[in-house]
């Protein structure tokens, strides 16, 4: 299966029609079955289309978006549902904010090639800023059947909490997609400690979309990537493809036969020692 | 090794004789005359040295002792108050077994026929060699590393040793205090498949040692591949996690990145990696010893405080760790979070799928 992660860098966002046309043009070139957009895609589009006023201070604008999200999400999902149909692909359109019973969650959706919503995943860990904004944590992780591949969604800060990848792997994940938005600067040096590290200790594939734009006073600079176990990637890097200057995406073919082979030759999860964890983890996690 | 009866007993007596603690102590007292003890640990700052040791066999155990002393003396002279040796740090002592060095040379020359020890053939396993030599090595190692720790007034992680423990053979790390007393040990929990073939037994728990220098743990090599090791230790309060390694593969930056570095970022602790390098018995060990910290506590956010340049040669990485800064980071961490609802839903029963699949495979095998 051919997959891509897109950073949204350079795409026009102000008019839905322009955004859809530019995204479609890029997706047609990439010829992928799955496309993943970065975290904050919904917030970014909502703001760019003038629904939130002037974006200056990031947290203040995000608060405004949280209040607006209930009305906005329908438009956001319809737009991306149409894009999934038009491009005949599975689409994870980044993240949005979802309100339920007065609580706000950061949520990603998986849209099928028929444009229908196949399911959603709520972010399970929040960073300090997100906690300060009054967001809530999701409490469950799901897997979706994506053209025969069991697929999980790892959102934002969940990439840095390895429990998420381990749960998905032990539930049978073949592939995880990640919607991220790493701030430019210091954070970038340890991007491999996120999804890359989760791939290496779980032997699934990952499609990592990182936001490549600025919003108000905040710049984002993570790098999109398609990741696999080191042993089945060029130079043992763990990367099948990475975003580069002038190429705001990463795209690659996932060869399941290769992954099955390395899982058979080097069955990492079978080396886990539950008897050493069982007595300690429940008590410590409390 | 095909000795039996009185010849075998005589040879074993010889090994005991050359490894006897009194002989070693005389050697050490001559060596440490010119010692420069490390400054005692004060406050919450601690200087550590991660040693990269080039492996070779020693026919004479006292030469091994002299070499280990040289490395400790250099680290202490650099101001290190905590010094870490690598995994399998007792293998060089096996040079006292006749013929082993020659076997190693044959393998290094590309001799295609692997000897039984390296191939793990049923006639003689690594575990059997260790069961034979272990009782001789254990008191020698205890005397050596206890004396070195006390002589230089340092915390000394002596590396891990393959040693017998009753019927089992374990890969066990040893931590000594500046008074020379053994603080504690840690058996390797996650074994490499080749170690299972060798007949090594896995540890069953992770130990944390409270010391005046901080809360220290010393899981071994492959234990750093799995986040569970560091999470269990972090949640118990670990501040410094030492990982001795002996990685038997050609060096590759990305393959090496799969161990301690991401673990230190996931579970904010200081990490010390000590590495065995060089060629022995057909294996090529590589690695870069280093001292690692959460990105927030390192210049440029690299997560690396110090690292040996060459993955194949002897070296030493020295850096200071600020345990108070670590605690401060943990109190108000920018992204670390906990989700007990999620964890209660999945842990620990999520692991039962592994046992079910193992049972299924065993049944299919029958």
Image (tube, coloured by chain):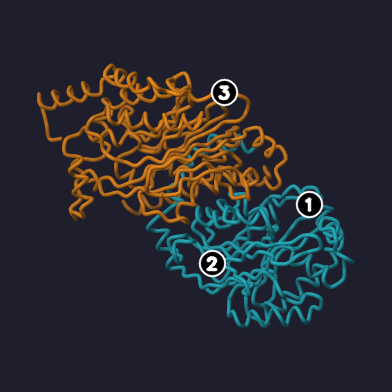
The local crowd at label 3, few if under 14, some if 14 to 19, many if 20 or more residues have their Cα within 10 Å, is few
Q: A248 and A274: which one is in front?
A: A248
Quarter of the image holding residue B174? top left
Element at label 3: loop
The mark total stands at: 3
Above or below: residue B153 compared with residue B288: above
Residue at mark 1: chain: A
The disc label shown at residue A108, or none: none
Residue B316: in sight, yes or no? yes
Q: Would you say B101 lies left or right of B362 here?
A: left
Q: Residue at x 67, y 71 (%)?
A: A111
Q: Residue at x 31, y 24 (%)?
A: B140
Cα distance in 3D space between marks 3 and 2: 51 Å
Q: Residues within 10 Å of mark 2 (few under 14, many from 20)?
A: some
Give the cyan chain's letter. Answer: A
Q: Which residue is mark 1?
A: A135
Spot occupied by residue A33 in the image (x, y as percentages of width and height):
58, 76
Asked if disc 1 and disc 3 are in contact, CB closer than 8 Å, the reply is: no
Between residue B225 and residue A86, name the one nearer to us.
Answer: B225
Q: Chain B's colour?
A: orange
> Is label 3 on the same chain as label 2?
no
Q: Is residue A121 found left or right of A75 in the rendered image?
A: left
Farthest residue, direction front: B34
Dot 3: chain letter: B
Q: Which residue is mark 2?
A: A149
Query: Where is residue B23 shown, x and y percent of the image?
Result: 26, 19
Q: Which badge, 1 or 2, is on the more N-terminal residue?
A: 1
Q: Is residue A272 left or right of residue B236?
A: left
Q: Which residue is mark 3?
A: B212
């Amino acid at each position: 299966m051919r997959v891509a992660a897109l950073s949204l860098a350079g795409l026009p966002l102000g008019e839905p029609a322009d955004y859809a046309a530019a995204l479609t043009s890029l997706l047609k070139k990439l010829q992928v079955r799955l496309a993943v957009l970065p975290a904050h895609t919904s917030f970014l589009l909502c703001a760019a289309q003038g629904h939130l006023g002037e974006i200056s201070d990031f947290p203040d604008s995000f608060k405004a978006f949280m209040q607006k999200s209930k009305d906005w999400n329908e438009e956001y999902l319809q737009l991306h549902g149409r894009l999934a149909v038009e491009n005949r692909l599975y689409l994870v359109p980044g993240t949005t904010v979802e309100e339920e019973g007065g609580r706000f969650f950061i949520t990603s959706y998986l849209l099928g090639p028929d444009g229908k919503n196949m399911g959603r995943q709520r972010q399970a860990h929040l960073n300090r800023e997100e906690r300060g904004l009054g967001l809530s944590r999701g409490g469950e992780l799901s897997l979706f059947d994506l053209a025969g591949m069991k697929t999980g969604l790892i959102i934002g800060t969940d990439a840095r909490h390895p429990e998420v990848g381990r749960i998905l792997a032990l539930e049978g994940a073949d592939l995880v997609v990640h919607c991220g938005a790493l701030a430019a600067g210091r954070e970038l040096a340890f991007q491999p400690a996120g999804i890359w590290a989760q791939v290496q200790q779980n032997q699934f594939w990952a499609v990592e979309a990182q936001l490549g734009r600025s919003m108000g006073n905040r710049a984002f600079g993570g790098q999109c990537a398609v990741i696999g176990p080191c042993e089945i990637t060029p130079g043992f890097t763990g990367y099948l493809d990475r975003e580069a200057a002038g190429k705001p995406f990463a795209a690659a073919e996932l060869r399941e036969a290769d992954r099955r082979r390395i899982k058979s030759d080097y069955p990492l999860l079978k080396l886990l020692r539950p008897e050493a964890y069982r007595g300690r983890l429940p008590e410590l996690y409390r | 090794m095909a000795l039996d009866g009185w010849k075998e007993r005589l040879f074993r007596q010889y090994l005991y004789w050359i490894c006897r603690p009194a002989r070693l102590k005389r050697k050490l007292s001559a060596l440490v005359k010119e010692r420069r003890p490390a400054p005692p640990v004060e406050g919450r700052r601690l200087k550590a040295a991660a040693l990269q040791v080039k492996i070779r066999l020693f026919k004479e155990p006292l030469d091994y002792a002299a070499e280990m002393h040289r490395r400790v003396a250099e680290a202490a002279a650099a101001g290190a108050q905590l010094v870490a040796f690598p995994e399998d740090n007792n293998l060089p002592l096996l040079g006292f077994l006749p013929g082993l060095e020659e076997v190693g040379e044959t393998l290094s020359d590309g001799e295609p026929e692997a000897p039984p020890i390296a191939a793990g053939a049923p006639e003689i396993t690594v575990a059997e060699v260790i069961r034979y030599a272990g009782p001789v090595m254990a008191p020698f190692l205890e005397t050596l590393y206890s004396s070195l720790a006390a002589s230089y007034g340092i915390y000394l992680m002596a590396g891990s040793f393959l040693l017998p423990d009753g019927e089992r053979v374990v890969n066990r790390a040893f931590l000594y205090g500046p008074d020379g007393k053994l603080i504690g040990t840690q058996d390797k929990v996650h074994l490499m498949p080749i170690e299972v073939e060798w007949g090594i037994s896995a540890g069953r728990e992770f130990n944390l040692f409270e010391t005046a220098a901080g809360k220290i743990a010393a899981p071994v090599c492959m234990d750093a591949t799995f986040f569970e090791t560091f999470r269990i230790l972090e949640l118990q309060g670990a501040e410094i996690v030492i990982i001795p390694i002996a990685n038997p593969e050609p060096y590759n930056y990305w393959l090496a990145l799969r161990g301690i570095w991401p673990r230190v970022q996931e579970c904010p602790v200081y990490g010390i990696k000590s590495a065995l390098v060089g060629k022995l018995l057909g294996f090529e060990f590589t690695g870069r010893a280093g001292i690692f910290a959460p990105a927030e506590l390192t210049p440029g956010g690299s997560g690396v405080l110090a690292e040996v340049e060459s993955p194949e040669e002897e070296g030493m990485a020295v850096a200071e760790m600020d345990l108070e800064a670590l605690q401060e980071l943990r109190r108000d961490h920018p992204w670390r979070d906990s989700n007990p609802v999620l964890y209660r839903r999945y842990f620990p029963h999520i692991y039962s799928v592994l046992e079910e699949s193992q049972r299924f495979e065993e049944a299919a095998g029958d």
